[in-house]
C-alpha cells in the first residue's frame, strides 16, 4: 500500500487513491465513474430485491457489494475506508479490463462514460433495477378518444 498525506486536497476519496497509487495512474476516469455510480445508487442500496442478480460475478454486482461495504464503513470505521476504496479500485479495474482490455488499458486514460455504461448495461446485469415494461399508446389528434392503428 502506498502511503500518502493524511489530509488530501481532493474532493473525493476515490480520486485520492488514484493519485497516490502508481498502479492507478490515469485512473481519474475510474474515480469519477465510481463516485457518480455511488452517489446515484447509494440511496437504493438497502433494497436488496432491486439489486439481486443471478450473476454474482458481473461488474454491476461487484460494484453493489463494494458500495455496500463503503457505505457501512463511512458510518462506522473511517480508518478501514481507505482499504476498502483501494480494494474496490483494484477489483473494479481488473473486472472492466477483462471485459474490454482495449477500451481500458493499464496505466492509460479511458472513457468514464463507457465505464458507467458497461456497469449498468442491462445485458450485462440482470438486476431487476434496470428491468421495466415499456408500453406505447397512440391516439389520433383529431379524435383523442380513438386509438390509431
Image (cartoon, grey):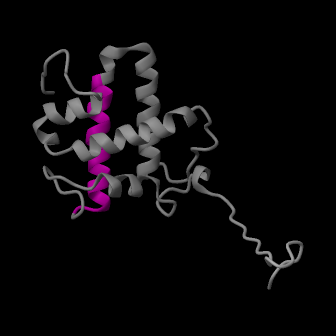
Q: Is residue 89 magenta?
A: yes
Q: Residue at x 48, y 48 (%)?
A: 56
Q: Residue furthest left?
A: 22
Q: Is residue 78 above or below residue 109?
A: above
Q: Quadrant of the C terminus?
A: bottom right
Q: Residue at x 50, y 56 (%)?
A: 125
Give the residue drawn at x 18%, y 15%: 6
Task: Give the overall secondary structure of the magenta segment.
Answer: helix
User: Which residue is most to the front?
Assistant: 142
Residue placed farthest to the right in the image? 145
Q: From the viewer's side, name the closer residue of 23 and 29.
A: 29
Please state the total of marks drawn on the protein image. Answer: 0
For residue 13: magenta?
no
Q: Residue at x 57, y 44 (%)?
A: 51
- 16 left or right of 115 in image: left
Q: Is residue 10 left or right of residue 23?
A: right
Q: Position of residue 2 (x, y in %)?
A: 12, 27
Image quadrant in which you'd find residue 87? top left
Taking 55 as reference, is 86 above or below it?
A: above
Q: Which residues are magenta?
A: 82-101
Q: Is residue 21 left or right of residue 134?
A: left
In screen coordinates, is 4 left or right of 83? left
Q: Position of residue 139 (x, y in %)?
A: 80, 75
In the image, residue 115 lies at what x, y percent? 34, 54
- Identify the image quadrant of residue 65: top left
Quarter of the picture containing the N terminus is: top left
- The vertical placement of 84 against 55, above or below, is above
Percent coordinates x, y for residue 83 in the rendering: 28, 25
- Answer above or below: position of 7 versus 35: above
Amino acid at each position: 500500500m502506498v502511503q500518502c498525506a493524511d489530509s488530501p486536497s481532493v474532493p473525493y476519496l476515490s480520486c485520492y487513491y488514484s493519485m497516490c497509487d502508481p498502479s492507478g495512474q490515469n485512473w481519474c476516469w475510474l474515480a469519477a465513474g465510481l463516485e457518480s455510480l455511488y452517489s446515484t445508487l447509494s440511496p437504493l442500496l438497502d433494497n436488496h430485491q432491486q439489486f439481486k442478480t443471478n450473476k454474482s460475478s458481473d461488474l454491476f454486482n461487484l460494484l453493489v457489494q463494494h458500495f455496500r461495504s463503503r457505505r457501512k464503513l463511512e458510518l462506522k470505521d473511517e480508518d478501514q475506508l481507505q482499504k476498502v476504496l483501494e480494494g474496490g479500485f483494484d477489483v473494479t479495474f481488473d473486472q472492466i479490463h477483462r471485459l474490454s482490455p482495449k477500451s481500458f488499458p493499464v496505466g492509460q486514460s479511458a472513457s468514464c462514460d463507457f465505464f458507467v455504461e458497461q456497469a449498468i448495461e442491462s445485458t450485462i446485469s440482470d438486476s431487476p433495477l434496470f428491468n421495466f415494461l415499456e408500453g406505447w399508446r397512440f391516439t389520433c389528434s383529431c379524435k383523442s378518444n380513438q386509438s390509431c392503428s
